[in-house]
Every structure is written in C-alpha cells, then in structure tokens.
Image (cartoon, helix red, strand yellow):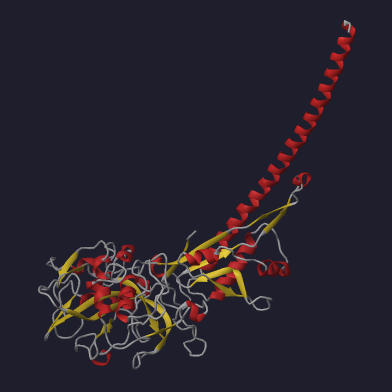
C-alpha cells in the first residue's frame, strides 16, 4: 500500500469518528434538555408542594381555632381554609370529589403510636359517610391530609412524564392556656364570681365554710375516663377504674381530653364523656359526677403517689413550698399575683396588692367577710372581698399578671347548666368554663381538723392526717389577662389555645 492509500484510509476513519461524535453530541443535548425539562417541572412541583404544606398548616390551624367548636365546625373551617389557600381553583363538585377520594394512609401508624385519630362525618349531601383525610383525636388533636394535587408538566412530556402529584399533612392540638388545665371538679350554674366555693368534700362535710349547710356532700368531682394523650403521657382507660387512681391523675394533670360546652343543656342531643370508641369520635359536652370521696383527691392533689409517676398538683410548680403534714405544698397566695402597678381609684382600694401586706403598719385587720371574726390583711377573706367588689364592675383593668398561669393552684373548671349536683352519679351539662383558684385544703386526724390556706401560716406538724375537703375561689373573667381568658362565645373563659403540632 502506497502512501496515498494510507492517507485515504486515515481520512475515512476520521470521517467515521466525526459521525460518532455528532451522534454523541446529539444524544447529550437531548439528555441535557430532558434533565433541564424535568428540573424545571420538578421546580414547579416543589412550589406546588410548598403551597400544599401552607394550605395544610393554615387549614388545620383554622380548624383548631374552633377550640370550643363541634367536630363539624372544625371540619368546615378546615375545608374552607384549605380551599382558599391551594393554588388550584376547584368547582364545588370537583372539591367534593377530591375529598371523597382522599385516603389518609398515615393515620393508622399515628394511632399505633398512641394517638386515637377518628375521621369526621362528611358534610350533608356527600356520597361518603366520613371524610378520611380529616380526623380528630378527642384527646385534643386535629389532623388534615391535603388530597393529591396534580400538576401538569410543561417540558417533561418529552421524556414521558406528563404530570406530578403532591400532597401534605399537618396536625394541630388544643393545648391548655394554663399549666393547671381543666380540673375534674364542677361548679353549679348559680356560683358567682369571687365566691368561695366547695369543690370537694366528704359525705356530710365538716360543717365549715364553704362546705357547710347545703354544700355538705358536694358531688362536684367528675368521673371522667382517660382518653390517652401522648402529650401528657396518659394511657387510655375507658372504664375509669379504679376511680381513686383515675381521679388522682385527672387532678394532678387536669383532664387529658377536650370537653365542650353544651349549646342548650338539654338531654337528647348531648355527647357523654365516654371514650372515643364509644361516642364515635364526637367531642363530649356532658360529664358525670360521682358520690363520696376517695383517696384520689388526697393523692392527686397533695400527697401522692399518683399512678404513672406524675407529681401531685400542689407539689408542682416553682413557687415556695411549706411542709403540710409531711408534704411540701405550694404556699403562694392569690394576692401575690395582683398587678402591683394598679392603685386606687383604678381598682377598689382593698384590691391593691400593698393592702395585703401584714407587715405594713398602715394595714389593719378587718372583718372582711362579715362573720364577726377579724381577718388578717393576707387572708383569703380579704382576697374574696376584693374579688366580690371587683366582679361587680366589668370596666376595671385586668387585676392579675400573666404569671398566674404557672401556679398549680390556678386552673379551669366546668360550670354546669344545673343549679344542683343531684343525688350523685348524674350527668351534668357544661354551660361554660370558669377559672378558679384552689384555696384551702382541710386535714383531719381523729376529732382534729386543720385548714391549710396558702401564705397564712399555721401549724401542720405530725403525721397520719387525711385530706378531706377542698375549696376554691371563682375568678372574674375580666380579672385575667387576655391570654388566660381567651374569647368564648359561651361566656366564661376559653381554656384551650390552638398550636401547630407537626
């Protein structure tokens, strides 16, 4: 082969390499264009996903703002807010179809971990009985899963991807506005603000105010089961047995589930306070009282042990403690939470914080409750007299500071429609919620009975004293800071506050 033949062969090989290079470049360009197309459409999908997350968060929080609303009201709020915050505009028919086809595949796993999410009934006219993607845990949680949102791709069809599907979910909870939660004690419908009320006593009482006379044998304690609340650490106990142990837990922590005011107080449309598997997930508005007194009062309030290792209520909190028959109990009186910047005439003269100081020579003991006995300036009688005067004028400034919420003696109680506890073991309908201050505990050993009022001193030595009686002071709604009273359409206070949980 001469040199010209070699040259021709070389030219052919180079031509072949150019052809291969052209093919590789073409494929590379196609791959780059395909990846670019997918990247652009994935970006659109990510934007849609962010919109889904925002809609889920806003929707579930909108539902949770109905803290005293029925499950249907919570559902409707969620549907309305998710619809207005999704990028896609739906017709009414398409919106209904979207939710009717939605399935929450994560709910079973959440329930296996301790929750008890139950789907809500569908709106009237829907073809399904319950909405699978909106559920409520009666312990105090609400969940929403946004139905799949389909986004058509713009460039990705060149590689066979015609649409992207996204969704999101969120959980909110109804938390207590104060650390004390809702106490398992009820007050009658005619109980007035500022009054010293009997929250619990032994059958027959001890003939000492306020558990004397017709208050003797107060059946105000609430026989409420445990729904199981993962946030509080309680385990479901639908039987509510043994009563003393369940009562102790409910006193120490507050009720572990949401209970609503009854809109009319009538039997027939009530939802009883039973476990969610019994009442099909509807939030209760009617609670059961029970007779007698059990060790659960003493254990949950003061002495322990509380089943589950929880701290007795009056042993909890940051306030100074005092030894009461071998138990270190909260010793901070209510007047310590009065706003010190308030002075007469903006508030009644005897409500000023300075007037409660017995070390101040300007303060002289008085018969604050008119029983013929002179009371110290730091006495509960002085505090109750202040609140009775304060309650009569709704235009007065807020009396207490927000730190009140950290006291284990501050909590919320249901107030009944009824003005009688009945004979015991009776269902009572919740009219509204009121805030209360746990004032006095009475301790008995043999014929000796001693009352312990926080901040008032006394001798509480010795052992084997039994706690037999508890009193409280009902606080006027407007005496509380806004964050502790909320805004309730039922009157009284709103004990829950919505929070985004996850």
Q: Which quadrant of the figure contains the N terminus?
A: top right
Q: Position of residue 187 (x, y in %)?
A: 34, 83
Instruction: In the displayed orientation, state which residue is furthest to the top.
Output: 2
From the viewer's side, name the closer residue of 114 and 50: 114
* Residue occupying the point 67% across, 46% down: 42
Quadrant location of residue 339? bottom left
The residue at the far front in this view is 1
In this rendering, position of residue 451 left or right of residue 47? left
Q: Is residue 50 above or below residue 179?
A: above
- Taking depth in this image into account, of 313 and 192 the one nearest to the observer is 313
Q: Is residue 284 left or right of residue 337?
A: right
Asked where in the image residue 195 lies, by quadrant, the reply is bottom left
Residue 161: image x %, image y %? Answer: 74, 49
Q: Is residue 232 above or below residue 199?
A: above
Q: Nearer the viewer, residue 234 or 419?
A: 234
Q: How many marks?
A: 0
Vertical relation: 114 (above or below) 441 = above
Q: Position of residue 153 (x, y in %)?
A: 74, 49
| Quadrant position of residue 480 | bottom left
Taking the image as drawn, is residue 474 in sight?
Answer: no
- Residue 383 visible here: yes
Horizontal arrangement in the rendering, residue 79 relative to residue 266 (left or right): right
């Amino acid at each position: 082969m001469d040199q010209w033949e070699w040259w021709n062969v070389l030219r052919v090989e180079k031509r072949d390499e150019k052809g291969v290079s052209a093919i590789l470049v073409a494929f590379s360009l196609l791959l780059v264009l395909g990846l670019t197309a997918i990247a652009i459409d994935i970006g659109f999908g990510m934007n849609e996903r962010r919109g889904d997350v925002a809609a889920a968060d806003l929707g579930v929080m909108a539902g949770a703002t109905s803290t005293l609303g029925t499950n249907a009201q919570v559902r409707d709020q969620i549907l309305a807010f998710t619809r207005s915050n999704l990028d896609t505009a739906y017709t009414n028919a398409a919106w209904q179809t979207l939710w009717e086809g939605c399935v929450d595949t994560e709910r079973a796993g959440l329930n296996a971990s301790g929750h008890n999410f139950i789907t809500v009934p569908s709106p009237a006219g829907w073809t399904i009985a319950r909405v699978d993607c909106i559920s409520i845990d009666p312990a105090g949680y609400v969940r929403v899963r946004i139905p799949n949102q389909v986004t058509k791709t713009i460039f990705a069809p060149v590689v066979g991807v015609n649409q992207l599907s996204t969704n999101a979910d969120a959980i909110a909870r109804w938390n207590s506005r104060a650390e004390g939660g809702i106490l398992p004690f009820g007050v009658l419908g005619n109980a007035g603000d500022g009054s010293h009320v009997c929250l619990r006593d032994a059958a027959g009482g001890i003939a000492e105010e306020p558990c004397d006379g017709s208050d003797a044998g107060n059946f105000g304690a609430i026989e409420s089961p445990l729904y199981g609340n993962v946030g509080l650490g309680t385990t479901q106990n639908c039987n509510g047995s043994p009563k003393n142990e369940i009562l102790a837990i409910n006193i120490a922590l507050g009720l572990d589930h949401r209970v609503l005011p009854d809109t009319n107080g009538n039997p027939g449309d009530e939802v009883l306070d039973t476990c969610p598997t019994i009442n099909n997930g509807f939030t209760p508005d009617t609670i059961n009282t029970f007779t007698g007194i059990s060790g659960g009062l003493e254990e949950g309030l003061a002495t322990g042990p509380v089943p589950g290792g929880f701290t007795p209520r009056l042993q909890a909190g940051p306030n100074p403690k005092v030894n009461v028959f071998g138990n270190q109990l909260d010793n901070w009186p209510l007047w310590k939470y009065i706003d010190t910047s308030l002075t007469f005439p903006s508030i009644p003269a005897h409500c000023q914080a300075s007037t409660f100081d017995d070390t101040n020579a300007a303060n002289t003991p008085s018969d604050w409750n008119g029983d013929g006995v002179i009371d110290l300036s730091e006495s509960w009688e002085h505090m109750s007299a202040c609140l009775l005067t304060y309650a009569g004028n709704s235009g007065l400034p807020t009396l207490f500071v927000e730190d009140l919420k950290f006291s284990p003696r501050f909590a919320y109680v249901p107030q009944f429609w009824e003005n009688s506890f009945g004979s015991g073991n009776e269902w009572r309908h919740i009219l509204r919620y009121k805030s209360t201050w746990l004032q006095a505990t009475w301790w008995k050993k043999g014929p000796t009975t001693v009352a312990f009022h926080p901040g008032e001193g006394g001798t509480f030595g010795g052992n084997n004293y039994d706690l037999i009686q508890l009193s409280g002071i009902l606080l006027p709604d407007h005496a509380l800071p806004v964050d502790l009273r909320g805004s309730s359409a039922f009157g009284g206070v709103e004990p829950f506050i919505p929070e985004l949980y996850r």
